Amino acid sequence: MRVLKFGGTSVANAERFLRVADILESNARQGQVATVLSAPAKITNHLVAMIEKTIGGQDALPNISDAERIFSDLLAGLASAQPGFPLARLKMVVEQEFAQIKHVLHGISLLGQCPDSINAALICRGEK
């Protein structure tokens, strides 16, 4: 079995994401493949900034908006390149993820701190 890991830059936009898909398809023809995908480029940085700003009583909305736009652009690009791409369903999934992130950030703002377990859970959301 081969394990292929792709960093954030490799899945930063639709063109690169589709290139990763081609690589995976090619490797899968040769045998079993396991895949590890990082969060798209800049997503983890935005998640860290959201946490830090929320703890500091600052507005995390610009980071939330930027992260939402990254996923929106990625999905739109994939939809335009792939007939039958389930855009509406995946947009809903992303919206639900961001609703949960905002809910957790609200809790952090009430506490004025972010426990390590919550920090880890939020940061890994970009790779879900």
Image (cartoon, helix red, strand yellow):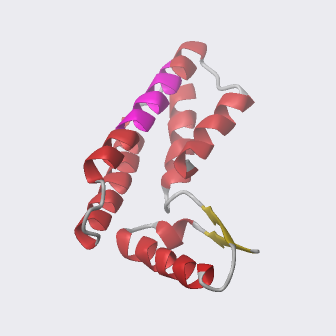
State whether residue 32 is above or below residue 50.
Answer: below
State whether residue 22 is above or below residue 112.
Answer: below
Can residue 56 be seen here?
A: no
Can residue 71 be seen here?
A: yes
Give the image location of residue 64, x and y in percent: 40, 40
Task: Decide which of 6, 65 is in the foreground and name it.
Answer: 6
- Dominant secondary structure (helix, strand or loop) of the stretch shown in magenta: helix
Q: Residue at x 27, y 72 (%)?
A: 81
- The image quadrant where one finds the N terminus is bottom right
* Farthest residue, direction right: 1
State whether residue 110 is above or below residue 98.
Answer: above
Give the image location of residue 23, x and y in percent: 54, 82
Is 91 positioned to the left or the right of 54 in the image? left
Q: Which residues are magenta?
A: 95-106
Quadrant in the picture for residue 28: bottom right
Q: Residue at x 39, y 68 (%)?
A: 13
